[in-house]
Image (cartoon, helix red, strand yellow):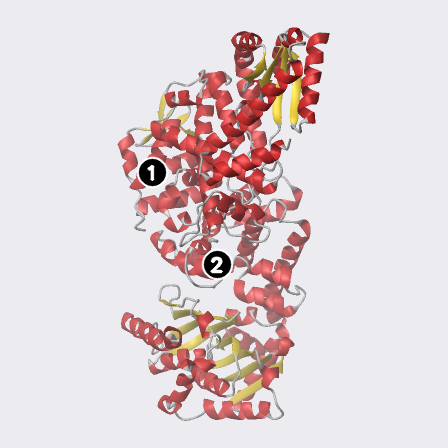
Amino acid sequence: MNIRKNLSDTAAGLMMQRVRGIKIVRALSDIIDNLIADAFDSVIGASLANMGSKIAVVATGGYGRQEMTAYSDVDIMLLAEKRDEFSAKTAELLLYHLWDIGMNISHSFRTLEECLEDAMEDITIRTSLLESRFIAGKRCLFEKYKSDIYQKIVFRKKSLFIKEIMQDVDKRHKKSGDSAYLLEPDIKEGKGGLRDMQTLRWLAKASLRIAEMLELKRIMSKEEYAQLIKAYDFLLKLRVCLHSISRRRNDILSFEFHKPAAEMMNIKTAKRHHAAEILMRLYYKKTAFIFNALDKVMDLSHGFYIQTQLDFSIKKLSSNFLLSKNEIIVRDRELLKNVDNILEAFYIYSKTGKKFSYQLKTDLLNRAIYISRRRNTTKSAAAFFLKILKGTRVYDTLRQMHDMVVIDRFMPEFGSLRHLVIYELYHKYTVDEHTLISIKNLENLKNTKDEKSQFLKKILLELKQEVLFFAILLHDIGKGVKSSSVRRHEEKGYRAIKSILERFDLPVSDRQRIEFLVKNHIILPKLALTRDSDATETVITLCEIAESEENLNYLLLMTYADMTAVNPRFWTEWKACLFYDLIKKAQQHMQGILEKRFEISDPIINKFLEDMPHRYLISNAFDEILTDFSMSQQLKDKKVLISINPRGGGTAELVIVTNDMPGLFLRIVRVLSMQGLNIIRARLYCSKSGFVVDKILLSNWCDICWEGLEDELKEKLQASIFRDSLRLKDQEHLLNISYDTKFLKGIVDLKRFEHFVEIDNETSTEYSILEIMSPDWLGLLYAISSRLYLNNIDIISAIINTEDGFAQDIFYTQCDGAKLNNEAVVKVLDSIYKVVFKALDSG
């Protein structure tokens, strides 16, 4: 007899009929019940009736709860009136017969007295016996057990029993990851899993005298009870699927089982989510119901083992909130219809270190709907939120806000990360959980005693905590942005957070730093783990992005928070050493440039260094700076100095030193475009005295290089730079080249990108900062710079980056020596949208 095949076939048939999970496991339990009952009758027989009368077969544990799957153990207890030769022989005959027919039996043999003794010594035995159910044998013996022994198992030393159950919950959750939002969860032992459902039942029996599931309605609303049963049903059905697909007893819902489990549960792919994603979102939602229900029962059971003197006095915490029985309560529940008061509740939670009363927790969860999703954050609510980020209980407070769905309403952009499954290498948590754990790990640094973490702790205590935590909260916001774009999540997030930060009325410096951190939060791992950290170019790249030692420190802590939240083992000592080493080299470079500058006795060189912007000093090695200085000195005799320096990977850096003039960058780009040279990076540095140092990295220099190209390029650049006027109409064919599809780099792929143009008129007091994100295409820079020139906009400085076919360009601009006025801003944006993206929109 193949019992497992029979169970598997039965389960598969019931799944196809879309039978509920509770009914499936009970049907499988019934099959086992009948097999055991038949076995008992056939083995004992008429000749052994006398022996059989002394024993009862009792289902315990999961089998006792009727939660059978095809690969579950069958837990039985052979209950005897007394331990004698007849009962022992009966038990032996029955067990051998069950093993012979292929049944996976886990058994125990006890008398009535031994049941109580064993239960009092071992909590595992005690909870297993709580699920006792009669199968075969002497029923009156089982009834005696239920009426006498069972009651003692439930209620003897009740307070200690309840305490042990609650302690076991904490231990089990920590062992299984201490989160319900694992990408590969343990659906039995994990947070909100089936074991928590069982724990709920044990506590309800011991502390609340609730014997049956239906009686839970005494402590739950009709809706809460319905949600709990649906969640329980879902997990049972999922476990049946997982065992059937695995063909073994397996409770880990690993990646390989997501898709087949979704198919078996008849979950279909929707417009926005694949079936596997929908399955996981349902799982997280259902486990949340179970854990919240367990939390409620634990709260109600708490008083049975905590013998403390309660303070019945009421203390005023604010005009709206009070402290009663050491818990936070609200003066009037109607106050929670106001977003300011809801945020104040969490601020008080953060500030006092006290817990919400269960009633207040329920009210906050139910009143979250009063927070408008229209992104019109009030000043008072924003102020409370920032105070929370400055406090000493940041993770705990944000966790409460997230669990009560408050943060989803208050900041809908973060709400889009809820239960979001992204299949990324090494990642263990959903995106929202990863973010909260990032904050938790960073906050834990403040109190760490670990010697290896003291370096990070010292840095953390010197930085603005609220800025760092806000940046971490938003760092993966781009993963929740639904679009056809193939841009990286940090770029999408950088664009998305701008509107969020505007709602919080942050100082410009704080806002800039948060934007910087979100946009660049993966740059340190990228450089340290995929580049040669000893290479000067790697160090300078990091310095150029960070611009200051303070930003380097922020990046290091951001990296620590992000990487330690990928999974508990992802942050390793050797990785930490790589990050520390690169940060140290970058700091030494920044400090060294200034130190060497002060060591120079030549006043002419010092004047050159003082004349150049701070960004120039950071972005160049000292020997490069001296070379640029030498070229600048020759401007007295020559109007333009040009050098072309081959670099690694077939690239070359074009360096142009000349006096600044309107349309200079356009003149340079025009020549490079006509020569078929592709710009992947450009750094334009304008001195205070009016000369410029432009450094342009060309990606395809070696591909098209021929003898005489360097001389021809220099000649054409000189001619273009000093041409009396720019006749753009005569060069219109260059613009048209950009829109010919044969010149576009994969127009089908380009359509998957989104483009972004913004002019920031607040960050700088001198310049209007034009920022453009777009797929790269031949003539893009020429199109941008020509539109600026035609609108009389001067490019004072620029940072041009092209990577993986995507351009991220920033231009510091002025009009008539000043920032652009509102009219000019509108005009420039309109011009660039119409011309620069014509190819994408028409391609």
Which of the 4 image quarters holds residue 87?
top right
User: Which residue extends farthest front?
Assistant: 46
Give the label on residue 332, or none: none
Q: Residue at x 33, y 80 (%)?
A: 791
Q: Is residue 82 left or right of residue 292?
A: right
Residue placed under numbered mark 1 in the picture: 342
- Say which amino acid is labelled 1: Ile
Task: Count residues near mark 1 (Cα–Cα under 10 Å), then give few for <14, some for 14-19, many for 20+.
Answer: many
- Say which amino acid is labelled 2: His
The image shows residue 635, relative to residue 609, as above or below, that is below
Where's residue 134, x and y in %? Answer: 55, 16
The image shows residue 295, relative to residue 834, as above or below, that is above
Which of the 4 image quarters holds residue 484?
bottom left
Which of the 4 image quarters holds residue 774?
bottom left
**Does the image show residue 392?**
no
Location of the C terminus by quadrant is: bottom left
Q: Secondary structure at mark 2?
A: helix
Taking depth in this image into account, of 168 and 571 the one nearest to the observer is 168
